[in-house]
Image (spheres, helix red, strand yellow):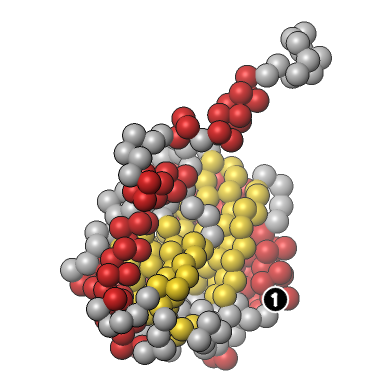
Amino acid sequence: MLVECVANFSEGRRPEVVAAIVDAARGPGVHVLDVSADSDHHRCVLTLAGEGEAVAAAAWRAVAEAVARINLTQHRGTHPRMGAADVVPFVPLGDTPMAYCVALAEALGERIAAELSVPVYLYGDAARRPSRRDLAHVRRGEFEGLAARMQKPSGVPDFGPAAPHPTAGAVAVGARPALVAFNAWLSTTDEAVADAVARAVRGSSGGLVGVKALAMNTTSHGQMQVSMNLVDFRATPLPAALEMVRREAARFGVAVTETEIVGMVPLAALLASAQYYLQAHHFSVDQVLELGLMDLASLQPAAGAGGPMP
């Protein structure tokens, strides 16, 4: 069964450490689809795909490497984090059931706790407590507040010691559907403006369904950023999120100067963007030339199989 793993690590400034984590993940049966690193966020995102057991083994190797190399007592970045290996979600691909990804998350979490002595919280569809379905709740207080939070009954991890790892903190391991990580830069350095825009867009504060948003101080761009996760990109497509950011920013005389998609994006999200902006309401995947050619290639007989040569 095919799965994706979008592992987030708290390192975006030392290329050699990012490379070591990526190299650790490489192995038979797993494909490294994408590596994204950001120095302002001080974070990297590694996208793996392949057969479930192979991907889980790759995630384990990458987590072990991160725990060995990253010291959160010396880490400062704009992105929330509680662990050296911060978030490790499994995403079902094709016909793979979510229950399979939950089982992978449980097995990986148990191994991380047992062999690395790092506390593990299960989140998303793997959560064992309703409050832990939401990653923001699991990570509240970040690394610096982790020790105090773990002293409370609500902060006891699902696996591992009831105290943070001294340098690696804790890790959230889970299962979830595909999402889109989408950032928009604003033509301002005013953090209050970016906070107001993020709050207006964020679903939990009355904004758009399935959208998480935070203001980020991205000093390398000299601008503030609204960093978003579209956890339900069908309910709120990319263009709808972007247009709301533009509209809210315009109230302060601020424009969107640039956007980015972090990591991989589902084709359905891009098709929805084309439909939205082109007003091509009946546009479908069948009209994408390259996908049609891929289907055609799959119908061609292999050389030597007795069929015509291409």
Q: Which residue is denoted by mark 1 in the rendering?
A: 15
Asked which quadrant contains residue 188, the reply is bottom left
Residue depicted at 68% across the width and 19% down the height = 300
Residue depicted at 40% across the width and 73% down the height = 256
Depth order, front residue of 24/300: 300
Give percent across and percent down for residue 181: 44, 62
The amino acid marked with disc number 1 is Pro
Q: Work out which residue is located at the far right of the displayed protein and give it.
A: 304
Q: Is residue 126 above or below residue 43?
A: above
Residue depicted at 56% across the width and 84% down the height = 220
Q: In screen coordinates, is 265 left or right of 278?
A: right
Q: Is residue 208 above or below residue 295?
A: below
Give percent across and percent down for residue 13: 63, 81
Query: What is the secondary structure assignment of the residue under circle 1?
Result: helix
Q: Is residue 147 visible?
A: no
Give percent across and percent down for residue 3: 52, 46
Instruction: State which quarter of the image contains the C terminus.
Output: top right
Depth order, front residue of 258/106: 258
Q: Is residue 17 visible?
A: yes
Give percent across and percent down for residue 42: 55, 80
Asked which quadrant contains residue 152, the reply is bottom left
Q: Work out which residue is located at the far left of the displayed protein and give it.
A: 206
Q: In screen coordinates, is 186 left or right of 56?
A: left
